[in-house]
């Protein structure tokens, strides 16, 4: 049977706005009483101190932590898992896109010790409700957005893990327990980074309107996300240091990812923007032009 | 230059003040690095001169002990330097980028420093170093009997500082001190740093200039029966004889427990104390106090000298004179501060009695706020308990434990987190403005630069929201297959139960072999009483899962029962306490979900309660409504199945549909609206405009019913995160006072409230960091345009949007006035004032973009009582 049930699922707690990180992370201690954290970043972040705002706070909260660098690959997930198993944390905090992506897989493997990577890698259909549900709850999982983030903080995907399996692992158990989008952690100077974020947001929004499983929940978020990108990206170009604009664009990315996560059916459709253009009240051509312009900027290094 | 002014008159002092001020103005722009260089050089120079300065002090004052004064000078230079060498005192001293707070330190300006005879050089060194570290200028007013040595110390520090780059003349002094000049400098300085006797401190505080004055000491050492007597007695002897007892924190009396009194006495005798006989006691009493004031001649003297003055002889080797006493009143000389080598000694019947005596001495004979000391076995549990009681009772700012109080009180010698200082604050008990050991932080002004930051925001929904016609049994599958639940408790109302709404659930539960019980006694506007009944039933049944099925009433009742079931101790009054910020509220909501998983299943499209953290409950005895709001109340799962809504009668469809529209509109206009809530609120509005009239006209229209179900849940998600506004505040009270259905009450008010909110010049706007200016008109126009309204100006678009809403209301049969719903005119206006005030105080008012005045609420009610006249 195709679908006699639809759903809307997002992380239980999504916190956002400039300066939200220190307030949100405090809950680890005040609400959840956590004592031991593994903090994940990518290798560049490990060298450059991307996770510093997080580790500084953990010190302040007297939460004992270990910092680990990960990559988006099977080998790195397994190595990370090893480190986590040894440390036995009661929470895992991933900072930035790569770490969030790898962290989702590490967390699930840590919580389900009988599950092998190969078995996890077979879970590539979000809509397959016959799959046995994976456990979570031992390690509270926090996803923190950084400069390279494009919405994975709120999605149930572990993109490109493994690399050759379509979009990658998909399972609602991968959803973070808490997502934090604090623009203080996002460097806004680099236009290609911001254009990339906008490109993914628009692409996700278009997919939502095109998907056979679309819903009003997803459309409401996707429509607004697309509107935000189209309104605020030009403002970003004109004034890249405007915090307010960056905040709107990062919200757009998260909202589009939330919407996309709830309608995705395992097939990534072409960039068909007809339906989105119609909803926005613009011609397909006009939207395509705007889209292309953003893609060009995203790809120009 | 300025050094050449000899200050001996008011005129020359004025000139000096000008000169120091000029130097300080330059000094104010020095960097931390420059200041630290000067600070170090000055400290080094003072330390080098510790012996000559000590010699001068003893010679000039005739008090104290040379070798001990060397230690004091050394301490004032070295410990002060070490404590503050890395402390930031210039410019930005603290920065928190995330919270947008920067702290900037600035000098105060000119310090007037009054110096006592008891520590004339060490205190001068101490104060000059503090002044240099904080970029202040300082002028010393020495004691007439110690002026030479104080000036020598100040001069020496000045020379070293200037050599290291400080402005010429940054430190000054009065060469020929007099009361008049001391008063003048105290009046003209920017702050007074006064160390000395009570008279002088009082003068400092009375001068009108901010003062850091510190009071007199009168420490007593309580010796408990658990104390290590050897350690206690020898430490006290050591402390008491240091510089002949002139440090203000020095022990003045011993209060020994009767069980150890003799042992203490024996040890004192063994170590060189002399116990006075009655005749000698009286002689000492008469010498010690003159008209109730301490005789300056005995200060800082050895026992044989004091005896000589009193008219008897003692051998030179006597170290301390002890006078045993019983009276703790002001009349007993031994109860007073002595500043010399005389100790009073009392016998206590018990620890309790010892504390009583210590307290009486403080209150009767002086020393309130200064220092107390306790000798005790602080490693035993009982000892720690006694220590806590002692610390609790003594009204002193220093409570020293197993520590000689003179050198212990000045800090950093017997405890290394206790700030070193020669100016010890006595708090308000001692009539002082500081209660700590005075340091650099007391001599700078801290500016706090606070940049506007916006509040953290969030988006929270139940973990699982399931929807689609017929989804109920499929969704419930999880209860068994995923969650392994065994006992379900169903909450619903009688109507729904009798009409078989629960059947599809109970069938499914039977099929899965989950035991269940049904509570079908929920009333409209559920009461605390019925919720309590439900919770009692739950406690008997012990469900691991609660399923609330129905309209807002059943879902709200279910939430409350859930709370009462999991936390019977919770207090409703506390939970319902009005708050401004849900994250900062005083009450911490109990943690939910430990006993049962909560599933909400709506049967009408309107309240959105299945996805909100709110519940309203009425206390049947008082009629009081308790609106509860906390994300702990968020259901864990929401199941929105249109099959359950197909039979809703027209009245319910209309009222709940327009309620959902009001939720979307108020959430969008709320000061807490976010991009996330905006997106779903707009979609909800679009759906309601299109499908509510269809669902109303033809209840069997599946698509319309399904879209309305979605719209209502989405609007619920929007206001679950952005909250509502004053329309709901007013509707709540209209419902409570005149029994209008909730949705109808909203329908009657919403368009007029929108006009009220859209004003570009409101009487008061809402307070919320991210709400920067009244922009509600533009916000409504965003909704309007997204719902297909066009126009040339915002005003035009807004008017058309209002018209579109009126049209919607007409299409679903909403009447035009409160009056038309049968509300009695006299009753309405009789109770209007109270209703307006209650609406103003409703929890929903806080998020409204325009902060309403009570009179404005009354006007809106009045206008809508009669409605549109056309
Ligand atoms: N928690 C929240 O977020 C929230 C929001 C809005 C309102 N509320 C609360 O909800 C309550 C009002 O809720 P309500 O308006 O849904 O009223 P309700 O739950 O009292 O239901 C009204 C009547 O409609 C009947 N009914 C429900 N579904 C039906 C259906 N499908 N077919 C036929 N009849 C049906 C019920 O049996 C009931 O008699 C108030 O107590 C209000 O405070 C709560
Ligand atoms: Fe409502």
Image (cartoon, rainbow, N blue to C red):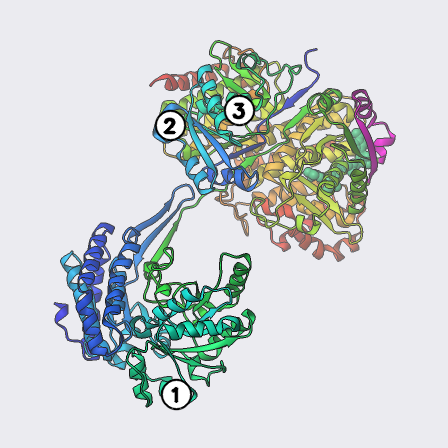
User: What mark, if any, has residue A107 been given in the picture?
Assistant: 3
For the point 26% across and 65% down, the residue is B71
Q: Is residue A134 left or right of residue B744?
A: left
Residue B508: image quadrant is top right
For the point 50% across and 15% down, the residue is A284
Secondary structure under badge 2?
A: helix
Tell whether position B507 is magenta. Answer: yes
* Badge 3 and badge 1 both on one subunit: no
User: What mark, if any, has residue A46 been given in the picture?
Assistant: 2
* Badge 3 and badge 2 both on one subunit: yes
| Circles 3 and 2 in contact, beta carbons < 8 Å | no
Q: Residues within 10 Å of mark 2 (few under 14, many from 20)?
A: some
Counting from the top left corner in percent of width and height, residue B227 is at 47, 64
Q: Which residues are magenta?
A: B494-522
Counting from the top left corner in percent of width and height, residue B80 is at 28, 59
**Numbered disc 3: what chain?**
A
- Count how many numbered circles sit on residues in the image: 3
Residue B706's place in the image compared with B801, above or below, is above
Q: Residues within 10 Å of mark 1 (few under 14, many from 20)?
A: some
Q: Which quadrant of the picture is home to ligand 1?
A: top right
Residue with the mark numbered 1: B280
Q: Is residue B733 left or right of residue B311?
A: right
**Numbered disc 1: what chain?**
B
Residue B213: image quadrant is bottom left
Image quarter (top left, top right, bottom left or bottom right) of the C terminus of chain B? top right
Q: CA distance from mark 1 to mark 2?
A: 78 Å
**Numbered disc 2: what chain?**
A
User: What mark, if any, has residue B291 been given in the picture?
Assistant: none
Tell whether position B36 is magenta. Answer: no
Secondary structure under badge 1?
A: helix
Image quarter (top left, top right, bottom left or bottom right) of the N terminus of chain B? bottom left
Q: Is mark 3 within 8 Å of ligand 1?
A: no
């Amino acid at each position: 049977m195709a679908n006699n049930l639809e759903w809307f699922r997002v992380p239980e707690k999504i916190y956002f706005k400039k300066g939200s990180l220190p307030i949100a992370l405090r809950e680890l201690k005040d609400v959840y009483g956590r004592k031991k954290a593994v903090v994940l970043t990518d290798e560049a972040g490990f060298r450059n101190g991307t996770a510093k705002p997080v580790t500084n706070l953990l010190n302040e909260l007297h939460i004992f932590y270990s910092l680990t660098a990960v990559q988006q690959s099977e080998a790195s997930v397994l190595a990370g898992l090893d480190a986590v198993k040894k440390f036995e944390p009661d929470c895992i905090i991933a900072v930035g896109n790569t770490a969030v992506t790898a962290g989702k897989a590490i967390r699930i493997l840590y919580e389900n010790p009988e599950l092998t990577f190969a078995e996890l890698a077979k879970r590539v259909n979000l809509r397959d409700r016959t799959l046995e549900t994976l456990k979570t709850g031992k390690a509270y999982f926090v996803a923190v957005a950084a400069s390279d983030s494009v919405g994975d903080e709120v999605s149930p995907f572990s993109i490109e893990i493994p690399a050759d399996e379509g979009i990658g692992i998909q399972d609602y158990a991968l959803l973070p327990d808490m997502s934090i989008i604090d623009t203080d952690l996002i460097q806004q100077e680099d236009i290609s980074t911001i254009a990339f974020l906008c490109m993914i947001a628009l692409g996700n929004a278009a997919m939502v309107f095109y998907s056979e499983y679309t819903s009003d929940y997803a459309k409401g978020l996707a429509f607004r996300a697309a509107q935000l990108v189209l309104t605020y990206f030009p403002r970003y170009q004109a004034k890249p240091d405007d915090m307010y604009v960056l905040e709107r664009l990062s919200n757009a990315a998260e909202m589009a990812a939330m919407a996309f996560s709830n309608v995705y059916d395992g097939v990534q459709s072409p960039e068909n923007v007809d339906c989105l253009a119609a909803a926005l009240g613009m011609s397909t051509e006009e939207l395509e032009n705007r889209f292309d312009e953003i893609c060009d900027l995203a790809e120009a290094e | 230059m300025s050094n050449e002014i000899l200050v001996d008159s008011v005129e020359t002092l004025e000139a000096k003040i000008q000169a120091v001020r000029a130097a300080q103005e330059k000094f104010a722009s020095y960097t931390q690095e420059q200041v630290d260089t000067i600070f170090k050089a000055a400290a080094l120079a003072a330390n080098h001169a510790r012996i000559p300065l000590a010699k001068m002090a003893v010679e000039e004052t005739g008090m104290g002990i040379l070798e001990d004064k060397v230690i004091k000078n050394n301490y004032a230079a070295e410990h002060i330097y070490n404590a503050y060498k890395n402390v930031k005192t210039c410019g930005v001293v603290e920065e928190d980028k995330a919270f947008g707070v920067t702290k900037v330190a600035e000098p105060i300006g000119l310090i007037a420093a009054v110096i006592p005879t008891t520590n004339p050089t060490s205190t001068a060194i101490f104060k000059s170093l503090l002044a240099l570290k904080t970029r202040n200028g300082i002028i010393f007013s020495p004691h007439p009997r110690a002026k030479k040595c104080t000036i020598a110390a100040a001069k020496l520090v000045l020379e070293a500082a200037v050599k290291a780059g400080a402005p010429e003349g940054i430190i000054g002094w009065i060469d020929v001190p007099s009361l008049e000049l001391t008063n003048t400098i105290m009046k003209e300085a920017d702050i007074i740093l006064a160390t000395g006797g009570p008279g002088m401190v009082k003068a400092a505080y009375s001068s009108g200039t901010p003062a850091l004055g510190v009071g007199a000491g009168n420490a007593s050492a309580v010796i408990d029966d658990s104390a290590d007597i050897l350690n206690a007695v020898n430490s006290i002897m050591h402390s008491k004889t240091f510089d002949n007892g002139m440090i203000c924190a020095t022990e003045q009396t011993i209060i020994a427990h009767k069980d150890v009194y003799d042992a203490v006495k024996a040890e004192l005798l063994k170590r060189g104390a002399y116990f006075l006989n009655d005749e000698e006691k009286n002689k000492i009493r008469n010498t010690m106090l003159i008209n109730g004031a301490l005789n300056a001649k005995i200060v800082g003297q050895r026992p044989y000298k004091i005896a000589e003055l009193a008219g008897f002889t003692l051998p030179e080797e006597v170290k301390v004179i002890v006078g045993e006493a019983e009276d703790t009143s002001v009349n007993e000389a031994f109860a007073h501060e002595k500043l010399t080598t005389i100790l009073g000694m009392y016998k206590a019947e018990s620890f309790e009695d010892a504390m009583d005596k210590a307290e009486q001495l403080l209150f009767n004979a002086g020393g309130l706020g200064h220092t107390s000391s306790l000798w005790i076995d602080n490693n035993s549990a009982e000892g720690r308990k006694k220590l806590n009681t002692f610390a609790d009772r003594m009204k002193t700012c220093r409570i020293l434990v197993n520590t000689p109080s003179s050198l212990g009180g000045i800090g950093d010698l017997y405890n290394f987190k206790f700030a070193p200082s020669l100016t010890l604050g006595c708090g308000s008990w001692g009539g002082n403005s500081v209660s700590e050991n005075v340091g650099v932080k007391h001599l700078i002004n801290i500016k706090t630069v606070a940049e506007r930051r916006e509040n953290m925001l969030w988006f929270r929904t139940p973990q699982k929201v399931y929807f689609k016609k017929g989804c109920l049994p499929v969704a419930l599958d999880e209860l068994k297959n995923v969650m392994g639940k065994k006992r379900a408790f169903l909450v619903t109302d009688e109507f729904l139960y009798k009409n078989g709404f629960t059947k599809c659930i109970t069938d499914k539960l039977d099929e899965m072999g989950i035991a269940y019980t049904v509570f079908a006694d929920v009333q409209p506007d559920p009461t605390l009483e019925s919720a309590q009944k439900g919770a009692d039933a739950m406690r008997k049944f012990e469900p691991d899962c609660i399923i609330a099925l129905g309209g807002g009433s059943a879902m709200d009742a279910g939430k409350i029962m859930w709370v009462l079931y999991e936390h019977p101790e919770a207090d409703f009054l506390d939970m319902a306490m009005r708050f401004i910020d849900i994250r900062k509220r005083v009450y911490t909501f109990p943690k939910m979900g430990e006993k049962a998983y909560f599933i909400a299943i709506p049967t009408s499209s309107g309240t959105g309660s299945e996805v909100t953290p709110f519940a309203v409950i009425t206390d049947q005895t008082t009629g009081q409504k308790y609106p509860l709001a906390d994300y702990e109340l968020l259901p864990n799962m929401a199941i929105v199945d249109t099959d359950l809504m197909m039979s809703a009668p027209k009245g319910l469809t209309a009222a709940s549909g327009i309620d959902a529209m009001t939720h979307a509109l108020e959430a969008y206009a709320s000061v807490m609206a976010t991009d996330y809530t905006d997106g779903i609120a707009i979609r909800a509005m679009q759906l309601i405009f299109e499908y509510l009239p269809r669902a109303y006209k033809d209840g069997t229209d599946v698509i319309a019913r399904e879209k309305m179900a979605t719209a209502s849940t989405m609007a619920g998600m929007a206001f679950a995160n952005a909250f509502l506004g004053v329309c709901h505040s007013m509707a709540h009270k209209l419902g409570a006072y005149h029994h209008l259905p909730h949705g109808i009450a909203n329908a009657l008010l919403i368009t007029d409230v929108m006009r009220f909110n859209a004003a570009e010049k409101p009487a008061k706007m809402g307070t919320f960091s991210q709400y920067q200016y009244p922009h509600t008109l533009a916000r409504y126009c965003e909704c309007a345009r997204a719902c297909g309204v066009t126009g040339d100006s915002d005003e035009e678009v807004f008017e058309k949007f209002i018209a579109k809403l009126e049209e919607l209301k007409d299409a679903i049969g909403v009447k035009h006035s409160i009056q038309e719903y049968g509300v009695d005119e006299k009753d309405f206006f009789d109770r209007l004032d109270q209703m307006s005030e209650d609406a103003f105080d409703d929890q929903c008012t806080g998020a409204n973009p325009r902060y309403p005045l009570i009179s404005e609420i009354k006007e809106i009610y009045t206008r809508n009582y009669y409605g549109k006249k056309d």
